[in-house]
Image (spheres, grey):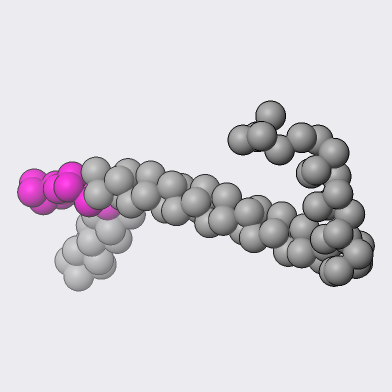
Amino acid sequence: MLGGISIWQLLIVLGIIILIFGTKKLRNVGGDLGGAVKGFKKAMHEEEKEKDEDETSDDQARVSHEEEVNTYDVKAEKKKAEDQEERK
């Protein structure tokens, strides 16, 4: 099997480990290990997400509008015309 180790030998080793550490301690170790793996996966997922966001924000940062946009404000023009009429 595993380098000459039979299933019975693995069960005996597992029994000795349970006797030494106890099931509660082994359960805690398993829970801690599972939590660490989940945290690692979550961190890797967030890092990939941030990397994707950085790439898209870089693309948006490269866009430049060199032309000045002249806006036309109709209300300001009407007010300016009314003011000129009042002065006359």
Residue 39 horizontal/vertical position (percent): 62, 58
Name the image quarter holding residue 3: top right
Residue 8 horizontal/vertical position (percent): 85, 39
Q: How many marks?
A: 0
Judge by depth and name the residue closer to the eye, 61 or 45.
Answer: 45
Q: Is residue 69 magenta?
A: yes
Q: Is residue 20 magenta?
A: no
**Residue 25 falls left or right of residue 86:** right
As drawn, the residue found furthest toward the front would be 4
Judge by depth and name the residue closer to the eye, 22 or 34.
Answer: 22
Residue beneath the point at 86% across and 69% down: 20
Residue beneath the point at 63% across and 54% down: 37
Q: Which residues are magenta?
A: 61-74
In this view, 66 is above or below 32: above
**Residue 45 falls left or right of residue 85:** right
Residue beneath the point at 86% across and 59% down: 16
Residue 71 horizontal/vertical position (percent): 21, 49
As drawn, the residue found furthest toward the left would be 66
In this view, 50 is above or below 22: above
Residue 51 horizontal/vertical position (percent): 37, 49
Q: Main secondary structure of the magenta part?
A: loop
**Residue 16 falls left or right of residue 57:** right
As drawn, the residue found furthest toward the top would be 1
Q: Which quadrant is home to the N terminus?
A: top right
In this view, 26 is above or below 54: below
Residue 5 visible in the current orientation: yes
Q: Which quadrant is home to the C terminus?
A: bottom left
Name the image quarter holding residue 11: top right
Judge by depth and name the residue closer to the eye, 40 or 79.
Answer: 40
Residue beneath the point at 89% across and 54% down: 15
